[in-house]
Each structure stands twice: as C-alpha cells, then as structure tokens.
Amino acid sequence: MNYFNSSKQELENEFSELVKQYRDYQAKGLSLNMARGKPAPEQLDLSMKLLDTVKSDDSCISEYGLDCRNYGEMEGIRECRELFANILETAPENVFVGGNSSLNMMFDTISCFMTSPLYEDTQPWLNVTERKFLCPVPGYDRHFGITGYFGFKMIPIPMDENGPDMDMVEKLVSEDDTIKGIWCVPKYSNPTGITYSDEVVRRFANLKPAAKDFRIMWDNAYAIHDINDTPDTLLHLLDECSKTGNEDLPIVFCSTSKITFSGAGVAALAAAPHNMTVLRNKYNYQTIGYDKINQLRHVRFFGGYEGLLEHMNKHKAILGPKFDVVLSKLSENFFENKIAEWTNPNGGYFVSVNVYNGTAKRVVHLCKEAGVVLTGAGATYPYGVDPDDSNIRIAPSYPSVEELKVAMDVFCLSAKIAALEKLI
C-alpha cells in the first residue's frame, strides 16, 4: 500500500489495524535492544582463548626479548605495532599502541592539541575562542560529544553515498582558520555504512586549510569489518597525503574493540612523524606504558595478520545473517509505501534509516513503549538536533536473529504508525 496514493479512509483503516498489532506487541512484555553496536555474546566467545596465551613467567617475554610485565615501550611492543601497521596500511614506526579504547585516544588527541601548539607559530586550540570542528552527518555521536566537551562550535557537513560534501569542506577550511578539524569514519561509516570514494579521499589529501594546524580525525574503526563477500575498499589516506605534501593532515585510529573484547581490546593510532612527536610529548607525562601483556596476548592469539583476517571471517558469519534480517524487514515493510529509506552496507555495525520527516522521535518512543530500545533520535547529529527529525541508527549486532526479527517488526510497525499519524 502506497500511503501517498491512498485515500484518507484507506489510511485510517490501515492505522486502526496497525495500532491493534502494536498493542499485541506491547502485551508481550518485550525487552530488546538495538541501541548501540555491542558485539553479541557469541562474538565475544570467539576470543576466549586469548586469555590463555600468557600464563607463565617466561611466556611474558616478547618476540623481541621485552619483559611485558615491566615498565617501558610507551609506544607499544614491536609485534603489536606491526600488527596494527597491517590493519592501517602503514609502517610500524608510524603506529602508537595505546590502551583498550580508540575513543580514549581520540579524546586524548584533541586534549593534547587544546593545550599544546602543533607548531611554533600556532596557538593551542584552547586559545582560539571561536574554534570550530566539521561534523559529517549523520555521524557518530561520541565524536560529537568530544568536540562538544572541549567547546568547539560543530558545523554539520552533509553526507551522500560517496562521503562528506567535499565542495563544502574545501570551501570552509580554505576560508576559516578557526576550523581546526573534521571527524571521519571513512569505511563503513557510522551510521550509514558507506565507504568514502577514491575521489573523496584524494580531495581530503589535497585540502588547503587556512589553519596550519587543521587535522583530519580519521576513525577507521571498521577497517576489516566486512559482513558479506563483496567488501568495500578504501583508498589509503596516509599514502595520498604523502603524495600531496600534506602528510601532517590525518591522524588515523582503530582498535580491536569489535574484534576481541570491547572492554579489553587494544587501540592504536597512526600519524606522520611531526604529529607523533607532539603526541608523544603528551604521553611522556601521561603514562609510562600501556598494558603490554594485553598487547602480547593479542599478537599471540592472532599469530599474524592472516590469522586476524580468519578471525574476522568468524564475525562475518555471525553478523551477516543479522544484517540480512534488518534489510529484508525494511524492504518488506517500506518498499511499497515509500515512507522510509535506508542504506545497504557491506560491513560495519549499523544500518541508517530515514523514516518519514518529523517522526523519528515518535518512532523511537513507540519502540520503547513496546519494549524495543533504539539509539535516541537526533544522536547522529551535533547537539542531538536532526533538522528533519528523520534519521535513526539501527544496531543489529547484539540481539539474536530471532530477537532481531521481532525487534524489526516492532520498529517497522512503529514507523508506519508515526507516518500515518502525520499523514492523516
């Protein structure tokens, strides 16, 4: 039934029937969660043997002879830097291995630049009273939370299937030296699941910012997180920036949070030598070294990059069917009535749905009242304000396939009800 070609009476009849179905779901007392991209228990189970890789005194010695129980190696053990160098497609010397969270490393990076000038002739960002940051939308709420915390004015940048609107990015950064950076999730972007095109990556590498200390925060969280056999490929920004003489522009982040244990993984960043020097000066005061035993565990558990890719195939086998459920339910419910649009990602952790304009908050509320928790409407925009009140991020990873079918039925039902309330 196409809602836009139907009479008011037909819409009212449809509405009455859907409300009956909705009340039936309310009576079931459901408790389902599609709010955050949490790995499911069976995904976490894949890595349990990691805990057995370091057991006795002599097993704490790294391949390069380092006792991982002691102080030292602030930038991470060599073997772990080599592993992340493969993920990030760079040299181990460009990699700094941190704690368990790439989000923490991103926060630390912004914090560092707030108080430490990147060059002798620039100011710490704290001294820039009208400092600004570019935020592709829809995007990752925790990114926006960091720059909001540090007092940046956040400027939304529209996204399409190729990435951010680069005409807008180029114009803004070339004209305004108070714009200090941009957030990017370049592969399987959160929440749309799109991967930046080669042209977009090259245009990032060719930026000519008015601010010498402008930085691209390149959060490559889903670099190897494919969910089917037709994965996207991402052009390597560090290489492209080296070609254009802009090697200082990007700082690249990733972690094993959705590879091994979300609360006990390993995070890393990669950057050109100048950025590494500035950041290293901060870390010299912040820590004597991160958890090297955990780094060693990860290296031994994977046994190398090929072992890591084999491990990711196990994740793909779990996640693929869940994404299939979400996409099939969306198609079944919205292909004809035209009240929603959605992305079809080849990887990552999310599906982005645009419901009928002005109804996203209502949809989230209806789902909650029926026992299905979603990420709050507006979370994918700076300050939590979606101007169209339409975007909703769906996270399929945590529920079981059967739970996901029910949760998606409730979601689709709620989206139809909210749209009909508007149309009628």
Image (cartoon, helix red, strand yellow):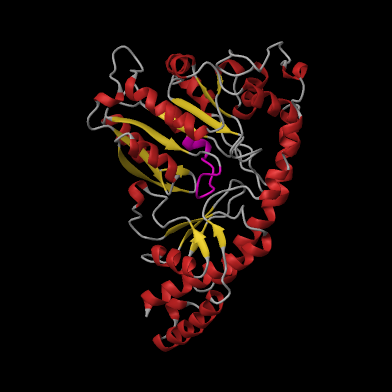
Q: Nearer the viewer, residue 21 or 173?
A: 21
The residue at the point 56 percent across, 22 percent down is 290
192 inside magenta stretch: yes
Q: Point out residue 236 in the picture as x, y percentages from the top left corner.
A: 56, 29
The image shows residue 321, relative to residue 277, as above or below, that is below
Q: How many marks?
A: 0
Residue that extends furthest to the left in the rendered view of this protein = 129
Q: Nearer the viewer, residue 109 or 32?
A: 32
The residue at the point 65 percent across, 17 percent down is 69
Taking the image as shown, residue 319 lies to the left or right of residue 333, namely right
- Residue 207 shows up from this direction: no
Q: Nearer the viewer, residue 126 or 222?
A: 126
- Residue 55 shows up from this direction: yes
The image shows residue 206, relative to residue 222, as above or below, that is above
**Quadrant including the C terminus:** bottom left
The image shows residue 412, relative to residue 424, as above or below, that is above
Q: Nearer the viewer, residue 376 or 240?
A: 376
Q: Which span of residues is magenta-colored?
A: 188-201
18 inside magenta stretch: no
Q: Point out residue 107 in the picture as x, y percentages from the top left corner.
A: 43, 31
Determine the main secondary structure of the stretch shown in magenta. Answer: loop
Taking the image as shown, residue 1 lies to the left or right of residue 181, namely right
The residue at the point 66 percent across, 17 percent down is 68
The residue at the point 29 percent across, 17 percent down is 122
The answer to which image quadrant residue 285 occupies is: top left
Q: Point out residue 150 in the picture as x, y percentages from the top left corner.
A: 32, 34
Q: Point out residue 392 in the picture as x, y percentages from the top left corner.
A: 46, 58
